[in-house]
Amino acid sequence: MASHLVLWALLPVGVYLLATVWHRRFKQYAHFPQLKPSFIWGHMKTIHEFTVKNNDLPDLHIDWIFRDMVKAAGNPSVLLVDLWPARYPMAVISSHEVAEQLSKATKQYPWSAPKSPTIADLVDLIGPHSILSKQREEWKSMRKQYNPGFAPKHLMTLLPCIIDKTEIFLGRLNKLCENGQSFPLTDLIISLTFDIIGAVTMGIDFDAQIPDSSREGEFIRVYDQLVQTFHGRSNMLPWWCYPKLALKRFRLGKKVDSLLEQMIRLKHGEEQPQEKRSVLSLSLQGHDVLDEQLLAQTIDQVKTFLFAGHDTTSILLAWAFYFLHRYPKAHEALVAELDALFGPESGESFELMKHKLLSPGGDELLNNMAYTTAVIKETLRLCPPAGTARMAPPGSNFVVHTPEGQHLCLDGMVVYNCATIIQRDAQVFGDTADEFMPDRWLGDKSGIMSSSNDGDSTIEEDRRFPASSWRPFERGPRNCIGQDLATIEARVIIAFVARKYTFSKVGLGELERNEKGAFILEPTRKCRLKGKPVYNVSLSVHTYFTGLPLTRVARINR
């Protein structure tokens, strides 16, 4: 009798739960463009099905799954991806016009729409006090504090450091040319960019390119282990789905904090010149006493800039060298520009190149590298290093207007500006949207530096494409503070490497040769692939990495 009463008592609860799930799945967001959801799994089942279709591409980045889903739904500007109850419902943005509404300053949100709370998934990597997770006035104050360290004029003073670190990189390439063995190019590039960002953020020489003699070898090793725990799609689900991984991240994060604390205390004890502009110096500026709160905030900012600073440029350079390998005409045009700017003889002389860049007018040479800039812009268009996720709190009435004429309220949803989809939009970039064509940026006066990244300093008539259609560093008030550093690094490194070395992909993404050993050109001016293409794989919430990056390098005989 009692059991029957319990069952009758539970019946209304069961009915209520079923009605709630039905409403969430099929009623609440019914007006949003979406694929058919599962009653139990929402769109998590759909994601799995699209992932299975790409089983031959392990760890394919989630952006490409989203792209396939958007196509299957008829290419809407906003696609609902229902991850409830494991995650917040998500709106994937595939239109630059809608993306701009999210990132621009408005009366409602003077510093653009708030960051998504899912940034907390990276807490072990960037810390709880990171500038990335700050909102409103707190973010504004922090951004103002660090802006001097990333001002273009100051960054040009870092040229000697960038060039010196590039010299070590070239030395490593020379040794690899001699033995002819295949190697992971990305590992070499990451070591190079980590060396540079270490100097920018902390004023410390990590010697990351000389691991055997590195004074900070333990930190680099532990930090790399921490970054690798974000490999794969684990961030699509809550931490409690991966308790062992979450514990490993937590322990490695604490170890990184401990090692950084030692370095920061040591630097704080040194007498710092007032004009020092490293992230560490700017954090400690005006503080004679290093209390626990200041120490914790400083550690998190250093972690944030170390991660973002080395990651963005390494991804850019790895893809740029691959594209230049597969598109020989683009490589020829790049070499011609560098010869014209620096002189043909400088291609073989490191000292001559260094002298030209560090002499008066060196910054003008960098700014005149129009085709090199086009190569960088096109690489970032095809392989953006990051996107942005925002969320307007429930009740905010944050409405976006789509090109299809819809008015969608995005309150309480994770809104993801998917740059991979936005920047390959055929309506903007035409039939060659998926092709590497640097020439498309020649004559586009929007530039590449942050001062022209918000659409304010360049009139629309000077642009070949809408300003909002190119957003690898995102746009608006919360655009990437380090974008100028990344592009200056890339120009310098490409200038030293492009005329001296050629890279050949091995295995995945390898190019086909004819009976004479020459590459076979397709009508689109790219070389034909021997097998499967290189693709983006998941490394973390914010970054992409080239799949299976084995490469050979050879000297160019000129």
Image (cartoon, rainbow, N blue to C red):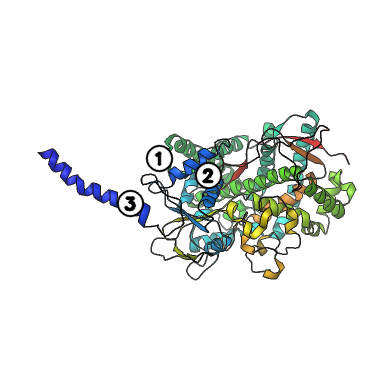
Q: Residue 61 or 107: which is nearer the viewer?
A: 61
Distance Cα–Cα, label 1 vs label 2: 17 Å
Q: What residue is disc 2 on?
A: 125
- Residue 240 numbered tag: 1
Q: Is 40 situated above or below 97?
A: above
Q: Is 97 situated above or below 351?
A: below
Q: Residue 530 or 225: which is nearer the viewer?
A: 530
Distance Cα–Cα, label 1 vs label 3: 25 Å
Label 3 SS: helix
Q: What residue is disc 3 on?
A: 22
Which circle's residue, 1 or 3, is located before the other in the chain? Answer: 3
Q: Residues within 10 Å of mark 3 (few under 14, many from 20)?
A: some
* Foreground disc of the pair 3, 2: 3
Q: Quadrant of residue 481?
A: bottom right
Q: Residue 308 or 32: which is nearer the viewer?
A: 32
Label 1 SS: helix
Which circle's residue, 3 or 2, is located before the other in the chain? Answer: 3
Residue 450 image offset from top left, x and y in percent: 66, 61
- Residue 436 numbered tag: none
Which circle's residue, 1 or 2, is located before the other in the chain? Answer: 2
* Foreground disc of the pair 1, 3: 3
Residue 336 image offset from top left, x and y in percent: 85, 51
Q: Which image quarter is the C terminus in?
A: top right
Distance Cα–Cα, label 3 vs label 2: 37 Å
Residue type, numbered disc 3: Trp
Q: Is residue 319 left or right of residue 16?
A: right
Residue type, numbered disc 2: Leu
